[in-house]
Image (cartoon, rainbow, N blue to C red):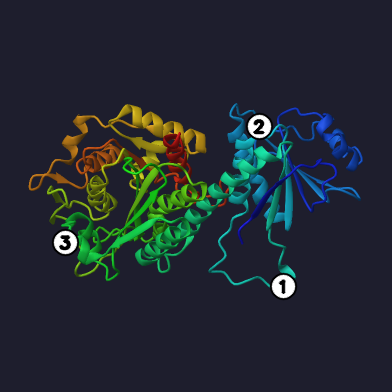
Amino acid sequence: MPLTLSVRRADAGAVETPLLIVALPPDATVGADLTALDAALGGALGRTLSRRDFRGARDESLHLAGGGRGPQRVLLIGLGRDTDRHAALRRAATLGGRLARKLGAPSLAWYSANIDERGVEVVMAGLSAGSWEFAETKSAPPEEERRPALGEAVILVSDEKAGERGLRSGRAVASGYALAKRLGMMPGNLCTPDYLAETAREIGARHGMKVTALGRAEMEREKMGSFLCVAQGTPQEPKLIAVEYRGGKEGQAPVVLVGKGLCFDSGGISIKPAQGMEWMKFDMCGAAGVLGALEAIGGMKLPVNVVGLVGATTNMPSGTAVKPGDVVQAMNGKFIEIINTDAEGRLVLADVLAYASRYKPAAVIDAATLTGACVIALGHTATGVFGADEELVDEVLSAGRKAGEPGWPLPLWDDFRDLIKSDVADVKNSGGRPAGSITAAMFLREFIGDYPWVHLDIAGTAYSETDLVVLPKGPTGIPVGTFLEFVRGRAG
């Protein structure tokens, strides 16, 4: 159930709510803004802070019982010493939303001192992210075991006009992340290339965007041999999905967002180990990020032109599957030797990046769960960022920081190209284990057109196989925020 979000001007101690979340910095005291709340709690808040039972550290929480009037329960959440207040608010709100859902609160109010328009936006996005869960393929628990679902959240503000502006953008951001996470969490037998195309059409219908989807026959006419070789082992129809948002001036060069959409990746003939293969339903998180970003961009009505491109298929072993040693030709005419059929995402993106040239883009950013090597290099904390245009790389890194999705630049030196030279073709699709994330990006660079380009390797950040404290294991929604903040920056 989506979270209903609103803002209200009210005193934290007087608001009638099943749960009040109060975000506090380290070593907070009861100031004038919290005096009424402390009184409603019979002085419990002041005693808790003076005894240092709650110290405001990052991810710290403390649950207090409410009084006879006002909040029924109060949840204190620590902001920590993060110098980026908005990042701290986002994280605290995400944890707060998650804890509120576990507590069974049907609704909540949020209070943090001196919250501005951007603060309202990030808190709303955080609360929505924390309260989100995927239950579409689960049976409902017995009636006696059910807790109320969190359905409503209100943020207490002093400036309602600024709060309303933050509310509008916060709703859009929350919707974009929720869409991307839902697509990521869906099993591969449900989230198929056809389903991604249908989702794109729904986004287009909501926001007035033009949507086209090329199938196998259309891609054959475009001579997309690189993309199609991945799809030749599956009976499912591959899709190249294009979503065009025209919020900017007519003729303005668009920003093009590209996403890898492998709805399931078995590895093909170079099949993956059975253990953990179920996680490969998340190999379409780049595509989910593109669609989620477009949902948010449409909701915010940003004055900029954006095109989203998704390359969607499944990578399966079969009698018709591409084999190691095969040579295929990409849309731009280059021949590719297939070394490893599990290096399939770059084969799909090769043709999608070549196709992007027809839009004469101002910039192209692609996102893909591309390499395990990037996870080894950067773990699950940072996205790998690659590009030869340093200004564009810095712009993307800045967008990621603002979104709370940090990235780290890795080199694309010409020396690395030697690792993907082929004896029988122009290039091969794998350079082996050394510098694996870099050689994958080098491969993609062979197929970009005459436009500025950045590649995001989100293999370590798009989903998690462990609990992340503020988020459960599963999809994170990355790179929705990076895409969105980049486009907002271009919108001025």
Q: Position of residue 452 (x, y in %)?
A: 28, 35
CA separation, marks 2 and 3? Answer: 56 Å
Residue 34 percent location from the top left of the image: 82, 35
Which residue is identified by label 2? Answer: 80
- Which element is circle 1 on? helix
Other residues around mark 3 within 10 Å, as few (<14) / some (14–19) / many (≥20): few
| Mark 1 closeness class: few <14, some 14–19, many ≥20 residues within 10 Å | few
Q: Residue at x 23, y 42 (%)?
A: 448
Residue 365 x/y as whole percent? 34, 41
Q: Which residue is disc 3 drawn over?
A: 221
At x 35%, y 64%, the residue is 193
Q: Quadrant of residue 489?
A: top left
Q: Which mark is residue 435?
A: none
Q: Helix, strand, or loop for circle 2?
A: loop
Name the residue nearer the viewer: 144 or 11. Answer: 11
Whichever of labels 2 and 3 marks the residue nearer the N terminus, that label is: 2
Q: Is residue 51 visible?
A: no
Task: Using the numbered discs, state the Cα–Cα distance from disc 2 to disc 1 in whole angstroms.
Answer: 39 Å
